[in-house]
Amino acid sequence: MRWDVQAFDLFAPLYDIWMPSADETALRKGLACADREGDRIIDVGGGSGRAARTVGATVVDPAAGMLARARAKGLETVQASATDLPHPDDSVDAVIVVDALHHFPDPEAGLAEISRVLAPGGVLVVREFDRSTRRGRLLEAGEHLFGFESTFYTAAELEAAIEAAGLEARPVEYGFETTVCGVAPAGRDDE
């Protein structure tokens, strides 16, 4: 088990105290990029459910301690890694990933897996820290000092990674906290 998952299991009781609320406005802007209605939403790497609560998503996370916190808030949870989602192909209308992509064991594989489960016209909304900003560089250095195997992106790198996963990247906002969407093409061929 990666240190990231172990650490989040340990920190679960204090996580919501340290972390600010999710930016509901940014998430709603991102969800509005979808080319379909968003009835089934999952929050991959959703931890304690701080973002899932704002948009009515199911929390998907590998850390049992974080999922216990999400369930205590009345949220539906699924224990799984971003690189091995238990959802069928084309079964999800929207996926949110809030401040978590940098903790995925393999971010590119995680984005490809998200692309697999997104229905045509569905949207991925990624809220992530831009490593090209001053605060982003400090956060990246701090997480590496703490032992996390974090992979941070610039906004342009994040857009390119989303495109490489087969989704149409649509930037929503830039800055230390960047929001980029990826929309699953309506006529894609997943052969």
Image (spheres, rainbow, N blue to C red):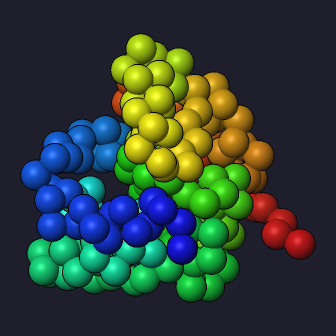
* Residue at the image position 75 percent from the left and 53 percent from the top: 166
**Residue 160 sits above or below residue 48 on the image:** above
Relative to 60, 74 lies left or right: left
Of residues 65 and 110, the one nearer the viewer is 65
Q: Is residue 12 visible?
A: yes
**Residue nearest the observer in this picture, 34 or 104:** 104
Which quadrant of the figure has residue 178? top left
Image point (20%, 46%), residue name:
19
Would residue 62 be found to the left or right of residue 121 on screen?
left
Task: Check the picture and name the quadrant holding the N terminus.
Answer: bottom right
Quarter that holds the C terminus: bottom right
| Left or right: 136, with 114 as reference point | left
Residue at 55%, 36% (x, y): give it: 152
Query: Is residue 178 depicted above or below 128 in this figure?
Result: above
x%, y% of residue 76?
28, 82
Q: Position of residue 57 (x, y in %)?
A: 31, 69
Q: How many marks?
A: 0
Percent position of residue 85, x then y? 57, 78
Q: Residue at x 38, y 50 (%)?
A: 98
Camera sees residue 36 = no
Query: Where does residue 148 sit, x and y in percent of width and height?
Result: 48, 49
Q: Residue furthest top?
A: 134
User: Does residue 171 sit above or below 5 in this rendering?
Assistant: above
